[in-house]
Amino acid sequence: MTVPGDATPHRVAHPSAGGSGRMQERQRQSVGVVLTLVGVQDTAVTVQHAGTPEASVAVRLGKALIYLNDRPTANALAFAWNDLARDARLLPREISSSLVAPLAGMAEPAVLIEAGGLPPMLGRVERPVGAYPHLRLVLGRVMFSVRDLGAYSSTTAAFRRAADCAVAAFPGTGRSTARQHASDEASRLFVAPRAVRRTSGREPGPMAPRVGPTNRITEQMRREA
């Protein structure tokens, strides 16, 4: 029996070439995740099962655990964060942690995310009227909302380490190609800003998308992967 709000997967039969039916799950929901980052993040980057079919690079940001399941994805994500370095100079050095204060009656959620096969990535700066600018980086159905310089610098550094660790996690995957070499070098060369002045918080203006380079890098890697 199905009740309102039941999240149980529903299975439907599809006829096969032989006339029998096979059961497949029908997708009935999608889950979006927003990670709001304030201040220097507690991060850790580790390699899991290097050189095996189960290899991955695990990136922990507080209570979010992100598994990167191939080297092109790790590199593209490092590119996406690095590409926002210029816009990150608009961020305040730090803001109040009240934005991420605990909620009464609810434990802080923890999330596990797996990414591979170059999911869509999009980065841009938001400039709300009368408030501090902030950055948004979207990875598939996951959105990182980056509120200050400490959050940006520490998270970008974690994904740069992940791109470096991917070399050990996925040995022999594209090491000889010019594309992979250029990707590795660019990930190391991009540097997040270390010091910026405080912004006034009264910086009006339209939203300034910064999606071109990130999209081009992702699309090129997808074509050549």
Image: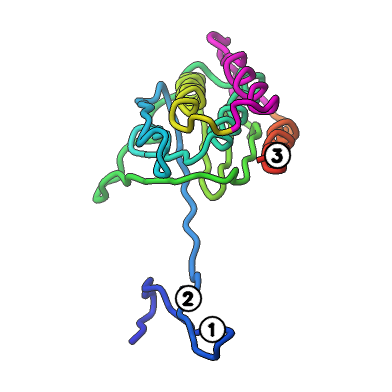
Residue toward you, 202 or 221: 221
Q: The N terminus lies in which quarter of the figure? A: bottom left
Q: The C terminus lies in which quarter of the figure? A: top right
Q: Residue at x 48, y 20 (%)?
A: 157
Residue toward you, 218 or 165: 165
Mark 3 residue type: Glu
Q: Residue at x 48, y 66 (%)?
A: 29
Mark 3 or mark 1: whose residue is earlier in sequence: 1
Q: Residue at x 59, y 17 (%)?
A: 199
Horizontal relation, residue 183 to residue 151: left or right: right
**Pointer 3: residues within 10 angstroms few (<14), some, or many (20+)?**
few
Q: Find the distance from the CA under tag 3 to the CA under tag 1.
A: 34 Å
* Contact (Cβ within 8 Å) of mark 2 with mark 1: yes
Vertically, is 106 above or below 19? Answer: above
Mark 3 or mark 2: whose residue is earlier in sequence: 2
The residue wearing badge 2 is 24
Q: Position of residue 72 (x, y in %)?
A: 58, 35
Q: Position of residue 164 (x, y in %)?
A: 49, 22
* Contact (Cβ within 8 Å) of mark 3 with mark 2: no
Instruction: Give the magenta-colored segment's residue range.
Output: 174-203
The residue wearing badge 3 is 224
* Contact (Cβ within 8 Å) of mark 3 with mark 1: no
Mark 1 residue type: His
Mark 2 or mark 1: whose residue is earlier in sequence: 1
The residue wearing badge 1 is 14
Mark 2 residue type: Gln
Residue 77 placement: quadrant: top right
